[in-house]
Image: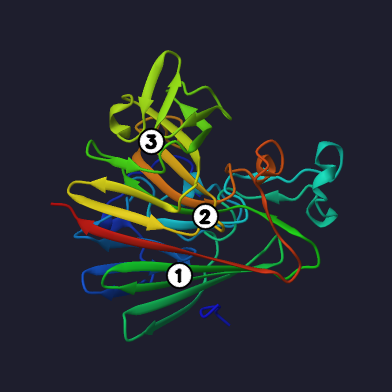
Amino acid sequence: ARFLPSGIHGPARVTAAARPTFGSAELRAGTTRVVIIPALGGKIASMEMGGREWLWTSDVIPHQTPIDGASYAETADSGGYDECFPSVAACTLPASSGRYAALSLPNAYSGLALPDHGELWSQATTFDLRTTDEGTYAACGWVGKRMPYRFARAIYVTADRVEMQYAVTNDGLDRLPFLWSAQPLLPLTKNTKLELPEGARVRVWAQHGIELGGPGAEHRWPRAVAAGKNHDFRTPDLIARNYACKLFVDMGTGRAAIEEEGARLEVSFDTAQVTHFGLWLNRGGWSPFARGKGYRNLGFQPCIGAPESLTEALGQWRSANWLEPGQTREWTLTWRALKLL
């Protein structure tokens, strides 16, 4: 690869003036602009393309110094674009016995507890910023805390695209199981339209305020038929008033798009490497706080493996991925946006 680099307990609405500040780096080429905050796990705080800002920003949870092992949902879900590895949901890996014995899960990982949204968001990254003939480039690097790996992401910003190149290396002596998910959060509005491969298998991971058949239920994009209703997920604002759900789409073709107020954002990738796509649809149906107002946002998430829990990916979902000792795995996302006529 050309880029491998050497708590709050309830909602507290904050003003911009009250937010702590962290150093950021801006990558710009033409009208394309990306802002990265290395101290916040390499969070992408802004992505402007095609004449608009695409990322959602929380007015409830401010940027704050991350704490390893804390709840991401309660302390770090401030919006923007994060990386989740080696799991998304907090989980404890199973013992390498019983129904998991055939997986040959190394004893080094038997019973290992992994934190909410993985390890990357809670540590500052290494950082390298450069300017090239085509545009600007920034690389972030992370080192595993509970597992022996190195994770790297390089972002190239040019006038017509944002290209993200990834690599993860297993530095240990045992096979390493993992899930990865990009976690860009976008606003969900009355104009939001989604485009994914027609007829692709959709599986339910979570549902709130809506009946989709429960976890594990299967549908075909773009429709979900359950409880006598036929939902069309191409227009998520029209499905119900206050609901939230997490869906995983098996990607037969490596392209997904979202349209919003006269603009279109598209992400493309190789499905031999990036196998799934996560959709978090929250139309006021979920908040991490018991009495908090539900958010209105959308997770538009290329991912490797499903669902959010590595334990469940190793088990019933059978979609966990593995790195052999010394192995490096690489993949690329390419984001493009354009104004619609």
Q: Amino acid at mark 3?
A: Asn
Most extreme residue toward the top is 228
Residue 327 in the image, given as x and y percentages of width and height? 70, 69
Q: Secondary structure at mark 3?
A: strand
Of badges 2 and 3, the one in the foreground is 2
213, above or below 228, in the image: below
Question: Which residue was labeled with disc 2?
Answer: 271
Closer to the chain start, of discs 2 and 3, is 2
> Image point 45% across, 53% down: which residue?
254
Closer to the chain start, of discs 1 and 2, is 1
> Image point 56% across, 58% down: which residue?
273
Residue 176 in the image, given as x and y percentages of width and height? 73, 59
Residue 38, label in figure: 1
Q: Is 174 left or right of 288, judged from the image as shown?
A: right
Q: Estimate the spatial distance between the alpha carbons at disc 2 and disc 3, rounded to whole Å.
A: 26 Å
Q: Amino acid at mark 1?
A: Pro
Question: Which residue was labeled with disc 3?
Answer: 282
199, above or below 20, in the image: above
Of badges 1 and 2, the one in the foreground is 2
Residue 332 in the image, given as x and y percentages of width and height? 48, 65
* Mark 3 in CB contact with mark 1 (< 8 angstroms): no
Viewer can see residue 58: no
> Image point 58% across, 30% down: which residue?
216
Frontmost residue, 55 versus 9? 55
Closer to the chain start, of discs 3 and 1, is 1
Q: Secondary structure at mark 2?
A: loop
Residue 42 in the image, given as x and y percentages of width and height? 46, 66
